Amino acid sequence: MKLVHIHKDGTMDDIDCSKLNLKNVCKKLTEVSQSQGNNALKLLYTWKYEDYSILCYGWYDGEAGFENKHDLPVSGSSSFLETDSSEQLLFGDLFMLKQQNKKFCDFEISTYGEFYTYAFGGFDDCDTDDESVNTISEDEDYQPEEDEEEELETDDDMDDENIELEEDTNEY
C-alpha cells in the first residue's frame, strides 16, 4: 500500500508499506521513519475529503532542529491536540494515509496535492484590482533608495546613448 512520507525538511516521497492495518500502523510507520520526535508516533489529525478520510501520523513533541517544515492544511480534527492543524508545530517525519471504510488505501503525493490545493481554497484568490496596484509613477510620496537612484541614473544615461545612436552619420 502506498502512502505519503513527508520528511522534516518538507520534501515528500511516495512509499510502499505492506500489510498496514489499524493495529500495526504506528509500529510500521515508526520503523520506516528517518527522523522522529519525542514519545511515540500518533495519529495527529484527520480530514474528511470526498468519500474518504486523510490521516496524518507523526510527532507533536520534539527537540529544536527536528521541526517538520511542512504546513498542514487547516481544520484537521484531533482527539487530543487543541491547536489548529495549520498552526501546530510538529517534529520529525509525517505520514499521510488514506482511509476508506476503515481500511487503508493507496495514497500518493499527487492525490495529497489535490486535497492540499482544495483545503487552501485553490490558491487562486489573488484577485488584483488595477486601482489597488500602486506604481512608482502614481505614488507622489515615493522616494527612491540610493541603489534605485543609481539604477535610474544608469537608465537615463542609456537613453542619451540611444539618442546619439539614432543619428544618421552616413554620407550618401
Image (cartoon, helix red, strand yellow):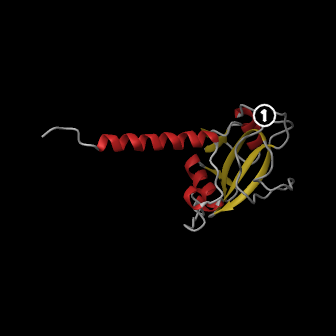
Per the image, the residue denoted by label 1 is 66
**Of residues 51 and 124, the one drawn nearer to the viewer in this rendering:** 124
87 left or right of 117 in image: right
Quick check: can you spot residue 12? no
**Of residues 9 and 61, the one drawn nearer to the viewer in this rendering:** 9
Q: Image quadrant of residue 94?
A: top right
Q: Image quadrant of residue 53?
A: bottom right
Q: Give above or below for 113 relative to 15.
A: below
**Of residues 77 and 10, the one drawn nearer to the viewer in this rendering:** 10
63 left or right of 70 in image: right
Q: Residue at x 62, y 64 (%)?
A: 50
Residue type pointed to by label 1:
Phe
Relative image position of residue 160 (x, y in whole percent): 40, 42
Q: Secondary structure at mark 1?
A: loop
Q: Residue at x 57, y 61 (%)?
A: 138
Relative image position of residue 17 (x, y in whole percent): 64, 39
